[in-house]
Every structure is written in C-alpha cells, then in structure tokens.
Amino acid sequence: MSMRFDAIVIGTGQAGPFVASRLAASGQSVAVIERHHFGGTCVNTGCIPTKTMVASAYAAHLARRGAEFGVGVGEVAVDMKRVKARKDAISGASRDGVEKGLRGQERCTVYQGHARFEGPHEISVGTERLSADRIFINVGGRAAVPEMPGVDRVPFLTNSSMMHVDFVPSHLVVIGGSYIGLEFGQMFRRFGSEVTIVEMGPRLIAREDEDVSAAIKEILEAEGIGIRLNARCISLSSHGDDVCAGVECQEGAPEVVGSHLLMATGRRPNTDDLGLDRAGVTVDARGYISVDDELKTNVEGIWALGDCNGKGAFTHTSFNDAEIIVANLLENDRRRVSDRIVTYGLFIDPPLGRAGMTEGEVRKSGRPALVGTRPMTKVKRAEEKGETYGFMKVVVDAETKQILGAAILGSSGDEVIHCMLDVMYARAPYSVIRRGVHIHPTVSELVPTMMWNLKPL
C-alpha cells in the first residue's frame, strides 16, 4: 500500500530542505528522502569542508610569512589529523543541523534510503511506496572521471575522497586546472605537498578571461605550484608506489610522477539510478534533467532543483532554485531562472569574485561597451595586508550605462563583487557606485575609482 503525501522531496542538498519546510509550513504533508548524508555536496564534500580546509591552509601560509609583518613564529608545522578533525566537526555540525531541522519539522516525514520512480507520481524507498501529486528532485552531482588511458589501473582521489585525507601527500598531481583542482592544489601546497597541476587546455579556468587566467597562474606559480598546460593526451600508469601521468605538452618533461593523484575533471548529475524513464522525465545527453524557466520538467507535477538540472552547479544557485519554486507555488510571485545573474567565486587565495558577463563574452556580443581595470597594487588595504596579487575589472554597456560584468581577483574579491552584483540586479547605471562614498581603507573603496577610468572596449 502506498503512503500518500501532498509532496515528495528527493535529496537534502541546499534546495530540498527549504522547499520541504516551506511546503510543510503551508499545511502540506511532505515526505523527504535522503539516501546518504543530509546536506548534500556543500555540507559534506563541497563548500563547507573545503573552505574550512582552505582556512587552515591560509593560517599555515600566513604563519610562514610572519617575518614580513615583524612577527616571529618559528618553524611552522601542519598537523593534518587536526586539520581534518576541525573540518569534520564543522561539516558534521552543519549536516546534523539539516537532519535535525527536517526531522523536527511538523507535517514532514523523513525516509532514509534510495529513491526510485515507479511511475510519474510514485516513488519506492526500499519496500516503502510513496505517492504525491508534486515531486521535487534535488539529487545533486558527483565527480566525473573521464575515460583516459590507464585510469582504471591506478588509485586516484576525487573531491569526495579527499575529505578522508589526514596526511600531507609528498607530491599531489592534480588532473584538471579549473575551480576544484586549483583550490585543492593551492591548499595542499600550503600544507606542505609538492603540487603539479595538469590541464589539457592552453590556460587555466578557460571560462574566464585570459588576463584572469594568466594572473591566477602567476599567483599559483609564485607559491611553487607546477603547472602543465596543453596536456592534450593524458595517460596514467603505476610507477612503483607512485602514480605517473603521461602528458603530451608543448613544454616540459613527458611524464609527471607523484605520490597521489587527484582527478578534478568536472561533475556529473546523480540521475542515472533514479528510474526517471519510468516517470517519463527527459534528460539531456549528459544526464541533466531538462527543465523550463520555472524548473518544471516535461512531466506535470515534477520539478528538478540544484546541480541535477544543469542550470548552475553552485550552492547559491541551488538555493535560488528553491526560492523560485516557493515563490511560484506559494507566494504568487512569478520568478524564473532567466532572472538570475551568473555569479560565483574561485576560493584560492586571493579569491576571485565573478558576476555577469566576461569581457570576452561582451566582445562577442558586439555591443558598444566600456571597460575599467585597477591593479590590486593600487589598493591600500591589499598593500597593508601584503596581498597585492590580482586586479579588478568591470565592463559597462556604453549606451545604457548598466554594468554587464565584473571580475575581482584579489584580497576580499569574493565579498567586494557583491557591491557590483546588487547594482546589476537593480538595473541601475554604474554611476550609482561611482558617486557612492565607500569606507577607507577597504578594497571596496577602489571600485568607484575604477569607474572613473572607463575606456572603450
């Protein structure tokens, strides 16, 4: 016999619990299904644990630089077991909080197990059968491992298994020069590992502008991280107890031998074992669930939220998906994915904050535009902190005067970007920022100054 609910939420990442709690608070009966850890990627293997480790790595890095600030700290040692314990405690508290909140929610029933569709409105969880007119899929994603020669014959780590590492690898080889790979690469370099990053493309993080990629490469190389670009054909093999990455690069040795290998080559959705075919739900060629501008699938009464819909692989976009659902279903406030401005951060040190279009995208659009830049060497707060790597850049529509996009690579760049982002959402001209009075000495105070130096793109 099937248990009947008003709604079923599959997965407890950033989107699922918010939707479940709001529906339950509105008087609806809700079933929440979680097959493993509550909280999804962000809480367990993504944002929270990795940024906790980044903080430990930053502390080690700053301690080693103590003499620059007139502070003597002696020899700096990293205890990875304590680093991991701190990370586990913070991540675990978040995970427990999500579970406790759901289990304590009135009109919300939690099921633990693997959810599979038996039809458009029926879900099985082990021997249980649940049904509802509304079903919300929030199953997230996992590391994608490409089929490269030898990958099935060598041990490797992913962003998930890195969470269990409680030692400092002697030489960490990272395959993939994008966000995950760069963050782990710098982190473990600061913990004391030798690090080599291998990237198939001609530059790091190819979605960014070339000047951003070049500046990030400079930052990482200054810390002693080896970077191999144009590795067009990567093969893997054992080399005694080590792992060998064969690379066809224009420069450098043909092989990189390391003690440990991290595969940081992208993500894939957790949709291949949900029985979506039984419900008739359409997925694209990569397995992402196809949704419209309001996150509805092709099947009436089924929505897909978060990483599994391919609309944004970030915690903040996942939560925004939940806000869109709640606004449309409960608040009579029509909201759409297309209203969202692309924004994200790269949490190396110094971090990159990004919003809107890149300079390259604006150029391709052909629209008349203005661009302004400012090096972080001109920012007194950055100079005071001894963190002068990077720069800030803004691109403005020459006709409407609205900000099209911005990149801030530098001290506090992940925070400063929001003053740009809020003005973009307000659809206000850039002069709103230029005429504003910002606090001295901060990084943000240089944003209005940058606005005074706009030039044709």
Image (cartoon, helix red, strand yellow):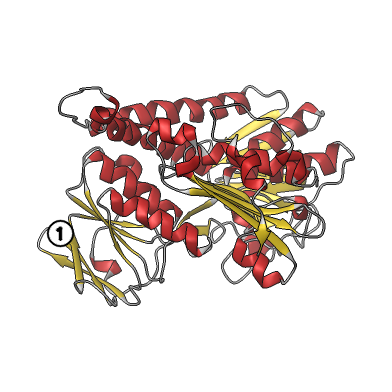
- 297, above or below 97, in the image: below
Q: Residue at x 23, y 63 (%)?
A: 154
Residue type (three-letter) at the residue carrying disc 1: Asp
**Which residue is at the front of the view, 83 or 446?**
446
Where residue 198 appears, x then y in whole percent? 32, 64
Which quadrant of the figure contains the C terminus? bottom right
**Which residue is at the front of the view, 139 or 440?**
440
Residue 352 visible in the current orientation: yes
- 214, above or below 135, in the image: below
- The residue that disc 1 covers is 242
Where residue 160 appears, x then y in whole percent? 39, 47
The residue carrying pointer 1 sits among few (fewer than 14), some (14 to 19) or many (20 or more) residues within 10 Å by Cα, namely some
Residue positioned most to the right? 332
**Would you say 56 lies left or right of 320 here?**
left
Residue 1 visible in the current orientation: no
**Which residue is at the front of the view, 201 or 161?**
201
Secondary element type, mark 1: strand
What is the quadrant of residue 443 in the picture? top right
Q: Residue at x 76, y 60 (%)?
A: 398
**Which residue is at the front of the view, 333 or 408?**
408
**Would you say 353 lies left or right of 319 here?**
left
**Would you say 10 lies left or right of 246 here?**
right
